[in-house]
Image (tube, rainbow, N blue to C red):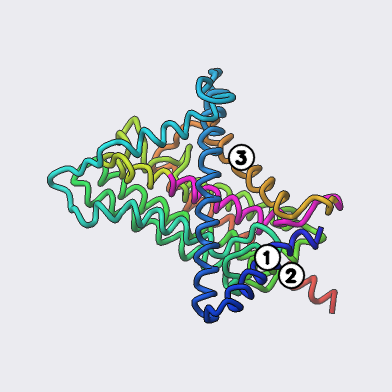
Amino acid sequence: MEENMVLFLVWVDMFRQWLVGIGIPALPAEILIKTILVLIVIIFVLTNLIVLVWLERKFAAFYADRVGPNRLGPAGFLQFPVDIVKMLGKEDIIPENVDRPVFKIASICAFLTAIMGWAVIPLGKGMILEDLNVGLLYFIAIGSTGTIAFVMAGFASNNKYALLGGMRTAAQMISYEIPLAFSLLGIVMITGSLSLTEIVDAQKNVWFIFPQILAFFAYFVCSIAETNRGPFDLAEGEQELVAGYFVEYSGIRYALFMVAEYTHLVAVSAIAAVVFLGGWNAPFGLTFIPGFIWMMFKIYLMIFLFMWVRWTFVRVKVEHLMHIGWKFLIPLTLFNIVITGIGVYVYRMIAG
């Protein structure tokens, strides 16, 4: 219901008025509110991390005809929290000949770039940190900077496997950023806006996945490559590179890379839900269910597709990965842009 969807905004406004009422100036009050909202987003992401790792292990076990975690908690749900406690207790080992400053901040940069993208992702009507009018462009720009952290980790580790993993990451992510951006241009052409909120509002009657099915397919494939997930996990490639760019990391620094990966996974799934699946808009007139619930359902639907693909297909070769990006996805997205442009022009001629 619309009232439930705007309740979050009402609470924020009431809290802002209370802060001003007790004598806090407007600017510090706004900074405090934004800080609290950022902490809520971080807690939301970390909570999803626990669920996602459990689901990942269960999916992997199911596709391999195994049981998966089943000892701690119901259906093994508490296995990952225990693993986190164990990981945080491990020694933070830094090899002797690494570039220490770069080595230390690489994992932090990976986490920050992953969490910064959430500033413009709406989880419901008004449930957004900052509703930028160029939100989609902001998300693409922030996502592209994540490559730097992986290259830093590979370069600073003084390890040939880490360096090769970092180089693979740079080549892979830079190559797939082009068709990823192109796949979203059709949506921008239809709506005439880069605001994620306006894109969701434009899908009240028709979700864009139907006229933009080619763009959705290209976005999905590019997102797999951008998040370094199988079958495009060449940057890690355990059989070849041991662990890739983070092979020398342990303890909390290793955990930050893992958190960044799943944070990015949820983020690209949220963008897919917003851009192609109608965001918080309810299907079939089921508006009695809050928009936040619909948004979370669509996000987890996308995550299920990511996990399904990861545990179904084998890892591709490096040259095949590049061929898919440059020789197939870029022409496909350009074709979609042309077709979308023709469709938009014809529609506007007919409408008016």
Kind of residue sitting beneath label 3: Leu
The disc, 1 or 2, on the residue closer to the chain's N-terminal end is: 1
Q: Give the residue drawn at x 58%, y 48%.
A: 220
Comes first in the chain, label 3 or label 2: 3
Vertical order, 23 against 153 (above or below): below
Majority secondary structure of magenta residues? helix
Q: Is residue 107 left or right of residue 275?
A: left
User: Under tag 1, what secondary structure?
Assistant: helix
Question: Residue 59 appears in which quarter of the rendering?
Answer: top right
- The magenta stretch is 259-285
Asked whether 115 or 182 is in front, the reply is: 115
* Amino acid type for the residue under numbered disc 1: Trp
The residue that mark 3 highlights is 305
* Viewer-nearest residue: 51 or 172: 51
Q: Residue 322, image x and y in percent?
A: 43, 48
At a point 68% along the width and 65% down the height, the residue shown is 11
- Name the residue beneath numbered marker 1: 11
Three-letter amino acid code at the position of disc 2: Val
Label 3 SS: helix
- The x, y position of residue 5, in whole percent, is 74, 60
Q: Residue furthest front?
A: 22
Q: Nearer the viewer, residue 62 or 322?
A: 62
- Of 33 and 134, the residue lying toward us: 33
Instruction: List the residue tagged with mark 2.
Output: 344
Residue 154 visible at all: yes
Q: CA distance from mark 1 to mark 3?
A: 35 Å
Please report the residue visible at 34 percent of the width from the left and 58 percent of the height from the top.
Answer: 148
**Residue 34 image offset from top left, x and y in percent:** 53, 68
Q: Residues within 10 Å of mark 2 (few under 14, many from 20)?
A: some
Q: Quadrant of residue 316?
A: top left
**Looking at the rendering, in which quadrant would you find the C terminus?**
bottom right
